[in-house]
Amino acid sequence: MIVIGNGESRLEIDIDHITETKVGCNAIIRNHTVEHLVCVDKRMLKECVQYSINAGTIYTRTNLVIGDSEIIKTLPELPYTGTQRWDDPFHWGSGPYAVLIAAQLSKTAKMIGFDLYSKNSYVNNCYKDTENYDASAKRAVDSRYWVHQISKVFECFPDREFKIYQTPDWQLPEKWILPNVHVDRISNFTYT
């Protein structure tokens, strides 16, 4: 299973040539088809429903489910309980939830576009400067929540393998240094 974040490194991958099941986030369905889509923001969900022909199932927060659509499902419960703000499901983003869904559906999750960091301190997102996204001149989002939340998925699913494809200069977060997490160069990604 392929989990697709919206970090700019993923632009090196031809998503339309991926034959494995795909879990994507938000505006990916503007341009690509995915079997599973995560939208935790009301504005993004409304937009994604317009493109629903490009998504098999759309996952969102319980309070955002629109009507009785068969393709819109509620997000899964978190596999752990925490006491910090970043452990509250409301503060989980689309990317961490996409990794969670992949972990629940597959023994292996290949991750692309989970850049976490900006190379120039400004927004690192394929969709910057488009509707429902930040301007490219805006400061990058602090990645600490994403790092923590995705690390919890890795920890809660020790029998799953997570392979992160990234650029050579990308740094693996310390919390992600686990036996079931591996990093490879994005140039080594194969379309199988």
Image (cartoon, grey):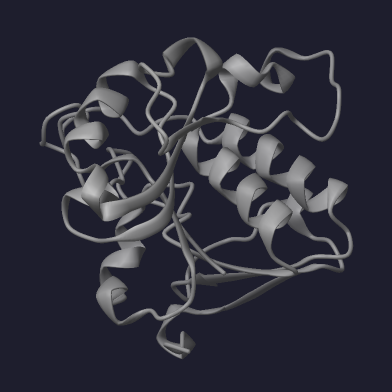
Residue drawn at 84 percent across, 13 percent down:
83
Residue drawn at 28 percent across, 51 percent down:
28
Q: Nearer the viewer, residue 14 or 23?
A: 23
Residue 93 seen in the current view: yes
How many marks the image carries: the answer is 0
Residue 71 percent across, percent down from the top left? 40, 39
Residue 69 percent across, percent down from the top left? 37, 28
Query: In the orientation shown, which residue stands out farthest toward the left?
Result: 130
Quadrant location, the N terminus = bottom right
Within the image, what quadrant is residue 139 found in? top left
Position of 45 relative to 159 (above/below): above
Within the image, what quadrant is residue 115 found in? bottom left
Residue 175 percent across, percent down from the top left? 77, 48
In the image: residue 77, left or right of residue 127:
right
Q: Nearer the viewer, residue 106 or 138?
A: 106
Q: Nearer the viewer, residue 169 or 80?
A: 80
Position of 89 relative to 107 (above/below): above
Residue 126 seen in the current view: no
Residue 77 percent across, percent down from the top left? 72, 28
In the image: residue 67, left or right of residue 133:
right
Residue drawn at 88 percent across, 59 percent down:
158
Position of 162 relative to 39 (above/below): below
